[in-house]
Amino acid sequence: MPKNSKVVKRELDDEVIESVKDLLSNEDSADDAFKKSELIVDVQEEKDIDVEEESEVEDERPAWNSKLQYILAQVGFSVGLGNVWRFPYLCQKNGGGAYLLPYLILLLVIGIPLFFLELSVGQRIRRGSIGVWNYISPKLGGIGFASCVVCFFVALYYNVIIGWSLFYFSQSFQQPLPWDQCPLVKNASHTFVEPECEKSSATTYYWYREALNISSSISESGGLNWKMTVCLLAAWVVVCLAMIKGIQSSGKIMYFSSLFPYVVLICFLIRALLLNGSIDGIRHMFTPKVENLHLEMMLEPKVWREAATQVFFALGLGFGGVIAFSSYNKRDNNCHFDAVLVSFINFFTSVLATLVVFAVLGFKANVINEKCIAENSKMIVKFLRMGNISQDIIPHHINLSAVTTEDYHLVYDIIQKVKEEEFPALHLNSCQIEDELNKAVQGTGLAFIAFTEAMTHFPASPFWSVMFFLMLVNLGLGSMFGTIEGIITPVVDTFKVRKEILTVICCLLAFCIGLIFVQRSGNYFVTMFDDYSATLPLLIVVILENIAVSFVYGIDKFMEDLKDMLGFAPNRYYYYMWKYISPLMLLSLLIASVVNMGLSPPGYNAWIEDKASEEFLSYPTWGMVVCILLMVLAILPVPAVFVIRRCNLIDNSSGNLASVTYKRGRVLKEPVNLEGDDASLIHGKIPSEMSSPNFGKNIYRKQSGSPTLDTAPNGRYGIGYLMADMPDMPESDL
């Protein structure tokens, strides 16, 4: 760096980024004397200056210790609970193996391009979501604020699920497991099985009554569930301690939280494959329920909508976590490779989890089916003794005291044909394993009811229960780290608060608000937030992100930036995806989601204690108001910021959020009198229209049309840079 530049840096206390090339590019052609007084540098020298400046900027921002740590962080964020308890359900519901084709197509059309886009802008501008979208287009700066609001809403209830997993984890160190059998109730005369448990099942009863102690409706609070309150507090303490130092602390934890779930899934798959019935479960998952279902399912819009939604949420698009993590990368990191790698790791994780889930459910269905056959065989023997069924119709080789599955089905079919009219009165069950596997469950029903029931039949069931719920905790924490990073990083970049203080305040506030989820009616609020706080707002956020880059900033300019950053030009496939296909697909998905939400009655499944079963209830009036408020509050920052900046409702000099400037890796308030287009920090006049710089209280901005774009000292931030306000000084000092 030229000596005179170092003098300026000392006198301005590191507030000015200066390079010979940028000063000369803004000089008027008449200032020949000034130019001659400067050092003449060649291209190589300019590059050296840029590298020095860039390294100084990088030093001020934390960075990942290794590429592996970064990849694990992105994988941990994108691979979450949905891969385990949502994807298998969608597979079974939408045609088994046939569902994988539309999912893969939409992963290529929506998933990878938009994931690549978020990685690129985060890495290029090196800011969180607020800073990135302020930089690209200040009028659309509300996108970043909306992402933070959605992240906060999701974090509120997502950590509750981690709390549930922690509770089950703590209860798994028992033999037998506490949800293995229905509890007995004693009164003065005799002992009997708990009626609510007898009507449902041991695992269902334990989930609704022992764990949640759930109320009968969302309007019936029932007070705090203290067991879950303690678990929620523990979950927030873990998140706070892991995030308090930013990526320096959370990055190290990623080695365990991201890799451990794969160890558990592989162990579960191997163990399950050694159990009876596991192959039946896997075969059921990949086999359509009726003939030609492959083609029928492929033509149903609902299948494509659900696949697109799963792709969208599986990669964590719109949350800001992807942008936040990538902002700590080096400028020349190959984020295209990262986008493809993480996307396919996510997909194969979903497939692996689906194999595990259906292998375990196949074993569970086989155990239940064997019990069914044993019970119904006893009934047949009873009917034979009573003379209701003739012994002559039973084949001689069949021993009903130790009957096989095939022999039982043979006897069942014979009795059904012989006793055609009287058969319904016998109340015999066909005991088909497919009937049990067709009971599709997802979400908490899969994890805390179906899977827990299956594990009670595992040899050494406490060990497998501990492993399973520890896996759920790790999957949840990986996603939580990305979600909280999507809040912390943008706020720290924008307001320059201490990360430690902000992290503690954010976690403490979230825990206090999260107490509504650990009431006895808390599960219903989790459902409400899951349905309404994220889906539509996130879709709108990602659509606006796509529009901001492709049409406001300019897709051609963005492709040039990527070429400069990556060192190679991305395939033109991304150009067409970002400009045409992805926006159309996202708009179609948004419309389909709105229509589906309008057609589906807003409500929730309430657990009715007397009936020991779930019943769909509509939200009360205040509940509907809360649902609408969640969606409105999540997306409100977008129009609010647009109106404020479009109409200049807040003076830029007042230090408001609407004006930010990037200097030496810091966010500073932008002075009032910016020359050029006020719509973006990026757009401005061409160099020939720029006046000579006056070293007073001016702001210097490298223009988008400048031929020196690619070697700007802070080229990582995209296009252009701003110099700080500085006191008047003589030219000799410069």
Image: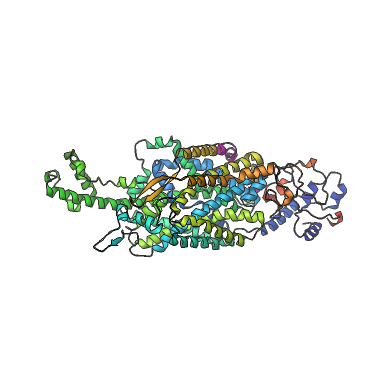
> Which sits in the foreground, 640 or 235?
640
The image position of residue 252, as x and y in percent, is 55, 62
Q: Residue at x 40, y 53 (%)?
A: 215
Q: Where does the N terminus fall, quadrant-wise? A: bottom right
* Res 65 seen here: no
Left or right: where 245 falls relative to 442: right
Image: 307 above or below 40: above
Q: Where does the C terminus fall, quadrant-wise? A: bottom right
Q: Is residue 575 magenta?
A: yes
Left or right: where 186 falls relative to 637: left
The image position of residue 536, as x and y in percent, is 53, 43
> Which sits in the foreground, 283 or 527?
527
What count of labels does the image hold? Answer: 0
- Provide the residue span drawn in magenta: 563-584
Image: 167 above or below 336: below
Q: Residue at x 67, y 59 (%)?
A: 59
Q: Main secondary structure of the magenta part?
A: helix
Image: 143 above or below 500: above
